[in-house]
Image (cartoon, rainbow, N blue to C red):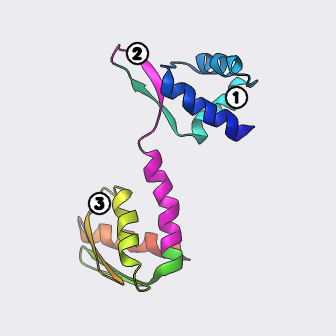
Amino acid sequence: MKSERQARILDIIESEEIETQDQLLERLRENGFSSTQATISRDIKALHLVKELTGHGTYKYAVSVRKNSLNFAGRLRTIFRESVTSFDSAQNIVVIKTMPGLASAACAALDSMEIGYMVGSLAGDDTALLIMRDAASAASFCEDIKSMIE
């Protein structure tokens, strides 16, 4: 029932400009879903809905553009746990060694996360080179990697 309700919420906000939880609750009731405001509030959080400005000067619910970035964080942890064999930093560069063929997957996941202090990445077959803004960012990122793979 929860997944059906959440799917219907996504359909509703895609087809209509819903400004409030009360409006959303009413539309759900019209579609045969009995729910409470607290449940709707939890659904909004779970679906990563945000309010965005419309062309009419009002606000409406929409799926956050950051939702995709959040999903990549989980994938990145999986990639690192399963494939990273070693990592180290030198000044503002982080070198990640992976199992053969997995360096590009690691870089793709990192690039999709839009990490502000990462300038870019370059992947070979089993080695990824990450260029950070400074040495402190590189060292901090190595600590993050360590916590991800432990």
Pointer 3 residue:
117
Along the line of sight, which residue is nearer the eye, 9 or 144? Answer: 9
Residue 123 visible here? yes
**Total number of numbered labels?**
3
Which residue is label 2 attached to? 58
Left or right for 9, reference 2: left
Quadrant in which residue 37 is drawn: top right
Label 2 vs label 1: CA separation? 23 Å
Callout 3 amino acid: Tyr
The image shows residue 31 at horizontal and vertical percentages of 68, 21
Q: Secondary structure at mark 2?
A: loop
Q: CA distance from mark 3 to mark 2?
A: 34 Å
Kindly report the distance in space between the C-alpha atoms of the residues bearing marks 3 and 1: 37 Å
Q: Name the kind of residue labelled 2 in the image.
A: Thr
Residue segment shown in magenta: 55-79
Q: Residue at coordinates 48% horizontally, 80% vertically from top-left?
A: 83
